[in-house]
Amino acid sequence: QTHFTIAIDGPAASGKGTLARRIAEAYGYHHLDTGLTYRAVAKALMDQNMPLDDEFLAEKAARSVDLSKLDRTVLSAHDVGEAASRVAVMPAVRRALVAAQQGFATRPPGAVLDGRDIGTVVCPDAPVKLYITASPEARARRRYEEIKSNGGGANYEEILQDLTRRDARDMGRTDSPLKPAADAHLLDTTEMDIETAFLNAKTLIDQAL
Ligand code: C5P
């Protein structure tokens, strides 16, 4: 085996990104936060004052996304996440980004990809698939603490409302809705810290390696 793929999906602020980074670090694998690719498309359109629902323009932006130039700091803004979930409903955008993500997934010796459709669409043959959940309240609390610790102002109720709206958009869309793959292992992190989640994941990965 020349490469090993680990697919991690789940809703916003479920802890999937932290878990994906932790796994990639422990196994010496590449890591791609695929949410950043949708955010990059949204940001490119926003920066040029272009509409977020023009599929032709959005596809062009998606084809120009460079996986090695995804800047987490720039793309993490809240309004970019909201805009990303709007461009993510367009099939032409998804096709372009999924092709790039699939290229990334085969990098040796292994790759961890996290997102919404990794186990179902991007890497349906991944030997390890995890679906991370947590209650909306726990996720909103984490996002709240994160913003606060970065010195920002945050309103818990507003965050909870935004998360719920984004969940509904991601789960309700026709193309590649957020849902667990049939063969995904479910991990509920509502009452679980990152290290426990990692140890659970490690057991599954070591069995598949
Ligand atoms: O994970 P993150 O919050 O960065 O994702 C931003 C948005 O990008 C999500 O709300 C979702 O609509 C979209 N996305 C997606 N498929 C992925 C990753 C993200 O549709 N694999």
Image: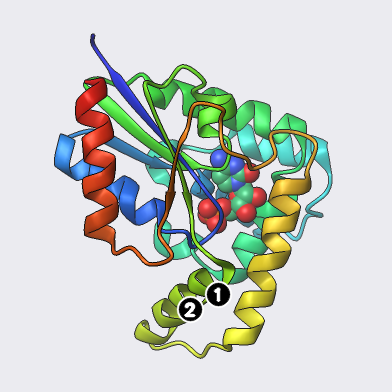
Q: Judge: label 2 CB < 8 Å from ligand 1.
A: no
Q: Quadrant of the C terminus?
A: top left
The quarter of the displayed image where residue 6 is located:
top left
Q: How far across and how far down the image is residue 86, in percent? A: 74, 52
Instruction: Tell me the SS state at disc 1.
Output: helix
Label drawn at residue 181: none
Q: What residue is rendered at 78% in x and 43% in y?
A: 173
- What is the three-letter code of the residue carrying label 2? Arg
Q: How far across and how far down the image is residue 62, in percent? A: 63, 37
User: What is the distance, in whole Å, between disc 1 and disc 2 at their CAs?
Assistant: 6 Å
Q: How far across and how far down the image is residue 88, in percent? A: 69, 44
Position of 71 compared to 175: left or right?
left
Q: What residue is rendered at 81% in x and 54% in y?
A: 51
- What is the three-letter code of the residue carrying label 1? Glu
Label drawn at residue 141: 2
Q: What residue is rendered at 76% in x and 32% in y?
A: 91
The mark closer to the camera, 1 or 2, is 1
Instruction: Tell me the SS state at disc 2.
Output: helix
Answer yes or no: do the residues labelled 1 and 2 have beta carbons within 8 Å? yes
Q: What residue sits right under mark 1 in the picture?
A: 137
